[in-house]
């Protein structure tokens, strides 16, 4: 195994760099800093190590070591379950919850990125050992390994990058109005606002949007309750929300126009900014568990 030390080290380094490349700490605090950050990097090192030693283990006929790859897959599924449970536990503390669909999407991404690390380090190791087999010098092996590792990293990141709302719909400014106590945005009823003081706040500080799907697939995706919950959460988190516990009047709700499939939402933000609200919704991810493609369904009888 000592003969493969260079390839193992280079493969681990590229794998860890791949995990760091996918790391993003933003307003969602996912991963949180520093505990979550350390957790992600540590798991990245483990995944990279497993991918790096697979080829040397096979070459030296240490077949028992290869079984760790199968065990790792099971462990990463357990990590996904733990991540889901952790987010579920803190969900009641959110003024505007993420929703189960968003939590599941985050947990699945957490698992998939560990596989990305393993694949990156594995392909790096394979490329270096192929060149080693042809007895090329170590410098060329390292260079080729790094090139393969970084190329794999870029391809997998593109593959794992999720769609955004702006890719499937157009977000437009909306108009807030009242029909008696009924709050409306562009003619669509949002909720009943019984208190006059609350209605006045909406009239003075409220901002609203209308989300127009590009096609039938987008309409089906956006109609999903989990996707709508994610939009509400993103808007409330980034713009701030004038709401406390047990104040349902100021809870942002995304409602669907049953006639055309458009979505509307009104928000009382701490810092009202119509353009920023549109930008936030445009950058909201399309959740994998909520994607629907009815136009591509095969409905012909068999």
Image (tube, rainbow, N blue to C red):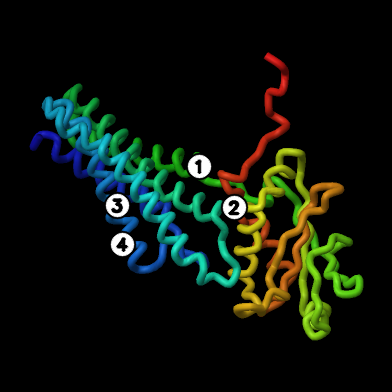
Instruction: Give how far across and how far down residue 222 sits, in percent.
Output: 70, 49
Q: Are marks 1 and 3 in contact (CB under 8 Å)?
A: no
The number of callouts visible is 4
Residue 38 numbered tag: 4
Disc 2 to disc 1, C-alpha distance: 14 Å
Disc 3 to disc 4, C-alpha distance: 9 Å
Residue for badge 2: 285
Q: Is residue 144 visible?
A: no
Label whose residue precedes the other's in the sequence (2 or 4): 4
Disc 4 to disc 1, C-alpha distance: 24 Å
Please give the name of the residue rendered at 85% of the width and 60% of the height, measured from the top-left corner.
Answer: 188
The answer to which quarter of the image holds residue 205 is bottom right
Q: Is residue 301 visible?
A: yes
Q: Are marks 3 and 4 in contact (CB under 8 Å)?
A: no
The vertical placement of 122 against 37, above or below, is above
Residue for badge 3: 43
Q: Secondary structure at mark 4?
A: helix
């Amino acid at each position: 195994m000592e003969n493969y030390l260079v390839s193992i080290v280079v493969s681990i380094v590229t794998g860890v760099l791949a995990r760091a490349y996918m790391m993003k700490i933003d307003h969602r605090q996912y991963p949180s800093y520093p505990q979550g950050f350390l957790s992600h990097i540590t798991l990245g090192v483990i995944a990279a190590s497993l991918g790096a030693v697979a080829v040397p283990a096979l070459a030296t006929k240490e077949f028992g070591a290869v079984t760790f790859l199968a065990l790792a897959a099971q462990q990463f599924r357990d990590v996904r379950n733990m991540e889901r449970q952790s987010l579920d536990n803190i969900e009641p503390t959110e003024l505007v919850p993420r929703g189960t669909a968003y939590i599941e999407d985050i947990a699945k991404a957490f698992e998939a990125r560990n596989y990305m690390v393993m694949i990156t380090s594995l392909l790096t190791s394979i490329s270096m050992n192929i060149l080693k087999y042809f007895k090329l010098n170590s410098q060329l092996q390292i260079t080729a390994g790094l090139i393969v590792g970084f190329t794999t990293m870029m391809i997998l990141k593109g593959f794992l990058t999720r769609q955004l709302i702006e890719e499937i719909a157009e977000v437009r400014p909306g108009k807030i109005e009242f029909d008696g106590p009924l709050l409306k945005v562009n003619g669509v009823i949002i909720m009943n606002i019984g208190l006059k003081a609350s209605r006045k706040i909406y009239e003075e500080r409220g901002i609203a949007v209308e989300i127009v799907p590009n096609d039938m697939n987008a309409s089906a995706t956006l109609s999903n309750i989990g996707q709508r919950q994610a939009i509400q959460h993103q808007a409330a988190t980034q713009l701030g929300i004038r709401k406390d516990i047990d104040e349902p009047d100021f809870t942002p709700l995304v409602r669907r126009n049953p006639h055309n499939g458009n979505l509307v939402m009104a928000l009382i933000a701490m810092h009202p900014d119509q353009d920023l609200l549109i930008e936030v919704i445009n950058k909201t991810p399309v959740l994998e568990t909520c994607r629907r493609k009815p136009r591509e369904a095969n409905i012909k009888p068999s």
